[in-house]
Image (cartoon, rainbow, N blue to C red):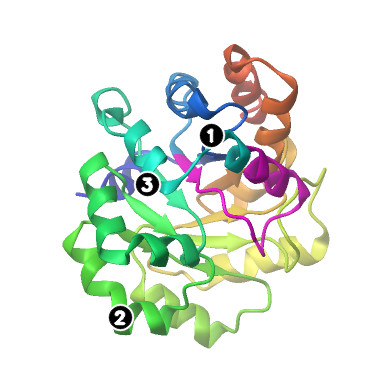
């Protein structure tokens, strides 16, 4: 069984943390993974830095640019993760854009993911239809889940189509804007969460974009299986030592 499925079977109120590989420093990827796992995070999304991140807000864009300047590449990331599974037992997902994966070679990229123990990929600019037509067999061969995103503007028909073709979970984008932190969710967003909950999808859902504190995390968990936090964590890394990651996670969980 994929580690993502195991996590959703045994846990409620899933907390997934996103960070940019190679940020703040090139060698921080493994130390951050270890500290997040020690802090009780359920799942980790490793951001693959890209020079033109269309869906990313200023915080993630900045961290991505710094990581690229630090020398982070896809191959460097795979080298850093070569022995990750000796210590990291929770699900690891790579999130990035399709252009670097194409340049690397999709089959070669998926094989590398398999070798280092990646459980799934989130690729916002790889549509369902193209994935199914050209790449699904490669993902399956390498035991990788392709995680799809939905937004408040995604039609019910499209959501059901994505749900039927998905494994792992569905990434429920909280708004149609780019990533970033918010102090609270508006009524419109909460109504969207409730609408998706009523659809009783076969896949679990995680809310992303705008989850930044214990209040937004709690609201996300009331209407989904948990939440993904990215910008707020990257801001924290910008201002704090890695040894304080446990403090960040405990605050989000309201402990």
Gap between marks 3 and 2 measured at Cα: 28 Å
**Which mark is on residue 22?**
1
Write down the quadrant of residue 163 in the picture: bottom left
Measured as percent of width and height from the top left, residue 199 is found at 51, 73
Above or below 206: residue 188: below
- Mark closer to the chain start, 1 or 3: 3
Sequence-wise first label, 3 or 2: 3
The percent coordinates of residue 104 (x first, y second) are 36, 59
Q: Quadrant of residue 235?
A: top right
Q: Which residues are magenta?
A: 44-66
Q: Is residue 64 above or below residue 197?
A: above
Can you give x and y, in whole percent of width and height, for residue 230 in the image?
63, 43
Left or right of residue 213: residue 91: left
**Circles 2 and 1: CB distance less than 8 Å?**
no
* Label 2 or label 1, whichever comes before in sequence order: 1
| SS of the residue under disc 2 | helix
Q: For the image shown, how many numbered marks are present on the structure?
A: 3
125 or 183: nearer the viewer: 125
Classify the position of the C terminus by image quarter.
top right
Q: CA distance from mark 1 to mark 3?
A: 28 Å
- Structural distance between the alpha carbons of marks 2 and 1: 30 Å
Which one is closest to the eye, mark 3 or mark 2?
2
Residue at 31%, 85% (x, y): give it. 133
Q: Is residue 140 visible?
A: yes
Residue 64 numbered mark, or none:
none
Q: Residue furthest bottom?
A: 157
Residue at mark 3: 8
Q: Which residue in the structure is indicated by mark 2?
A: 134
Identified at 47% across, 73% down, the residue is 126
Instruction: Residue at 65%, 61% (x, y): give it.
Output: 52
């Amino acid at each position: 069984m994929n580690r993502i499925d195991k996590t959703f079977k045994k846990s409620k109120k899933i907390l997934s943390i996103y960070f940019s590989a190679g940020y703040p420093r090139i060698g921080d990827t493994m130390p951050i993974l270890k500290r997040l796992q020690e802090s009780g995070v359920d799942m980790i999304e490793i951001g693959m830095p890209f020079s033109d991140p269309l869906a990313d807000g200023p915080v993630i864009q900045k961290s991505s640019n710094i990581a690229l300047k630090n020398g982070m590449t896809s191959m460097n990331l795979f080298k850093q993760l070569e022995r990750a599974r000796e210590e990291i037992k929770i699900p690891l997902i790579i999130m990035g854009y399709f252009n670097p994966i194409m340049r690397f070679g999709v089959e070669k990229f998926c094989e590398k993911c398999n070798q280092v123990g990646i459980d799934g990929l989130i690729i916002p600019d790889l549509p369902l239809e193209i994935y199914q037509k050209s790449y699904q067999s490669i993902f399956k061969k390498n035991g990788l889940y392709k995680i799809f995103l939905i937004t408040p503007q995604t039609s019910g028909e499209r959501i059901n189509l994505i749900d039927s073709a998905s494994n792992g979970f569905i990434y429920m984008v909280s708004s149609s804007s780019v990533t970033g932190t918010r102090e609270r969710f508006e009524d419109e967003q909460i109504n969207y969460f409730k609408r998706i909950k009523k659809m009783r999808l076969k896949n679990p859902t995680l809310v992303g974009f705008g989850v930044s504190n214990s209040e937004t995390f709690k609201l996300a968990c009331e209407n989904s299986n948990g939440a993904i936090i990215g910008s707020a964590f990257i801001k924290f890394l910008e201002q704090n030592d890695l040894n304080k990651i446990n403090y960040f996670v405990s605050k989000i969980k309201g402990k």
